[in-house]
Amino acid sequence: MPLDAVIDKGERVLRLLADVTGVRQSTCPWQSMRDPFVGHVMREHRWWAKGAPTAARAQMPRALVDGLETYDGALAMTLAHDARVERERLEREQRERGARGVPGSFSRRRR
């Protein structure tokens, strides 16, 4: 595979991530998963997302709260993006089935 093709695929991934999260990565996106703090934020997020008590949140280090808020926002944006892409795919497939007159489509046939 030519080097240009590899760079192009990598650039497309970085652009997609920037579109979804609003942040342009300057390194490999997976590299951050090796950071112990990122792992801690991801583990704590399960608890945070279930509505951690306000008193417990007040005891957290500010850096952890910032990390949780950042991760939660990025995760919400990613899930919304994925839902939009899936909805668009389903709508496109529905239109294609309707255009072909496939049974089960919502298109109405003229009598």
Image (cartoon, rainbow, N blue to C red):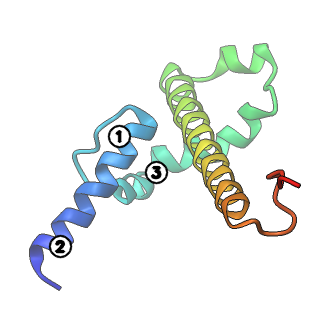
Residue highlighted by disc 1? 18
**Extreme-bottom residue of the structure:** 1
How far apart are labels 3 and 2 at the CA level?
A: 33 Å
Q: Which residue is mark 3?
A: 36
Residue placed under numbered mark 2 in the picture: 5
* Direction from residue 71 to residue 59 in the image, left or right: right
For label 3, the crowd category at 10 Å Cα-Cα, with few meaning under 14, some 14 to 19 and many 20 or more, is few
Q: Describe residue 70's horizontal placement relative to residue 50 as left or right.
A: left
On the image, which quarter does residue 109 sit in? Answer: bottom right
Query: Residue 83, image x and y in percent?
Result: 65, 45
Answer with mark 3 or mark 2, whichever residue precedes in sequence. 2
What quarter of the picture does the C terminus occupy?
A: bottom right
Seen in the image, is 23 located left or right of residue 44? left
Gap in angstroms between the C-alphas marked 1 and 3: 23 Å
The residue lying furthest to the front in this view is 111
Q: Position of residue 99 (x, y in %)?
A: 66, 60
30 relative to 4, above or below: above
Residue shown at 39% from the left, 46% from the top:
17
Which residue: 83% across, 51% down?
Answer: 108
What residue type is disc 2 on? Ala
Q: Secondary structure at mark 2?
A: helix
Q: Of discs 3 and 2, which sits in the foreground?
A: 2
Packing grade of label 1 (10 A; few <14, some 14-19, many >=20) is few
Q: Is residue 82 visible?
A: yes
**Residue 28 visible from this viewpoint:** no
